[in-house]
């Protein structure tokens, strides 16, 4: 039995690298917006309450209102970042699963005895274009009758 390497899941490096970089930049962008929003809100609060003589109860009430507004602002930034991240993830996932659906359809038609007309092509930007080449070689072998399955 073959020994598994620690990073054996890194089999298709370009898409995985693209996905990790996309996630890093999305996370960094959301974090920067969260930090910027927090610092800006604290700055506004400190400037607005600097010249006022407030009792501890009034300060406590203003802080409570400030934290509620800050929470809503940060929650909004987080939710927008989350939905943008989900959208980008779905686009990325579509670039991987689209070719797999195409391969499944071609294989199902081969099982039914039909050979596809023309070459199997993936959309521009889809990952694993070498899979289309291998599938085209398989279809060509089936059409020419060269396919021999050995047991």
Image (cartoon, grey):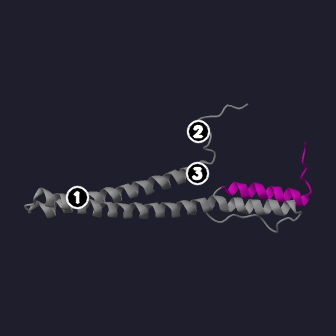
Q: Residue at x 24, y 60 (%)?
A: 64
Residue carrying label 2: 7
Between label 2 and label 1, give the one nearer the viewer.
1
Residue range highlighted in magenta: 128-151
Q: Earlier in the sequence, mark 1 or mark 3?
A: 3
Q: Quadrant of the C terminus?
A: top right
Identify which residue, 116 or 35, lies in the foreground.
Answer: 35
- SS at badge 1: helix
- Determine crowd level at label 2: few under 14, some 14-19, many 20+ residues with C-alpha closer than 10 A: few
Q: Is residue 129 left or right of residue 49?
A: right
* Most common secondary structure along the magenta stretch: helix
Q: Position of residue 120 (x, y in %)?
A: 75, 64
Contact, mark 3 vs mark 2 (Cβ under 8 Å): no
* Distance between the alpha carbons at the discs numbered 3 and 2: 15 Å
Contact, mark 2 vs mark 1 (Cβ under 8 Å): no
Between label 1 and label 3, give the one nearer the viewer.
1
Q: Is residue 6 left or right of residue 51?
A: right
Residue carrying label 3: 14
Q: Position of residue 24 (x, y in %)?
A: 45, 52
On the image, which quarter does residue 57 sit in? bottom left
The tag on residue 42 is 1
Q: Earlier in the sequence, mark 3 or mark 2?
A: 2
Between label 3 and label 2, give the one nearer the viewer.
2
Q: Quadrant of the N terminus?
A: top right
Q: Position of residue 90 (x, y in %)?
A: 56, 62
Identify which residue, 31 or 120, lies in the foreground.
Answer: 31
Q: Earlier in the sequence, mark 2 or mark 1?
A: 2
Residue furthest out toward the bottom: 117
* Distance between the alpha carbons at the discs numbered 1 and 3: 42 Å
On the image, which quarter does residue 66 sit in? bottom left
Q: Position of residue 137 (x, y in %)?
A: 80, 56
Q: Residue at x 59, y 38 (%)?
A: 7
């Amino acid at each position: 039995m073959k020994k598994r390497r620690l990073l054996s899941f890194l089999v298709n490096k370009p898409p995985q690298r693209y996905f990790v970089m996309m996630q890093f930049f999305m996370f960094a962008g959301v974090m920067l917006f969260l930090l910027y929003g927090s610092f800006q809100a604290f700055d506004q609060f400190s400037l607005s309450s600097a010249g006022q003589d407030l009792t501890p109860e009034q300060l406590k009430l203003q802080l409570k209102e400030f934290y509620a507004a800050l929470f809503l602002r940060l929650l909004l930034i987080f939710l927008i970042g989350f939905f943008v991240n989900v959208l980008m993830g779905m686009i990325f996932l579509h670039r991987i699963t689209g070719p797999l659906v195409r391969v499944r359809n071609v294989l199902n038609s081969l099982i039914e005895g039909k050979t596809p007309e023309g070459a199997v092509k993936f959309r521009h930007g889809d990952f694993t274009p070498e899979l289309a080449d291998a599938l085209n070689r398989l279809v060509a072998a089936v059409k020419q009758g060269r396919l021999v399955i050995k047991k």
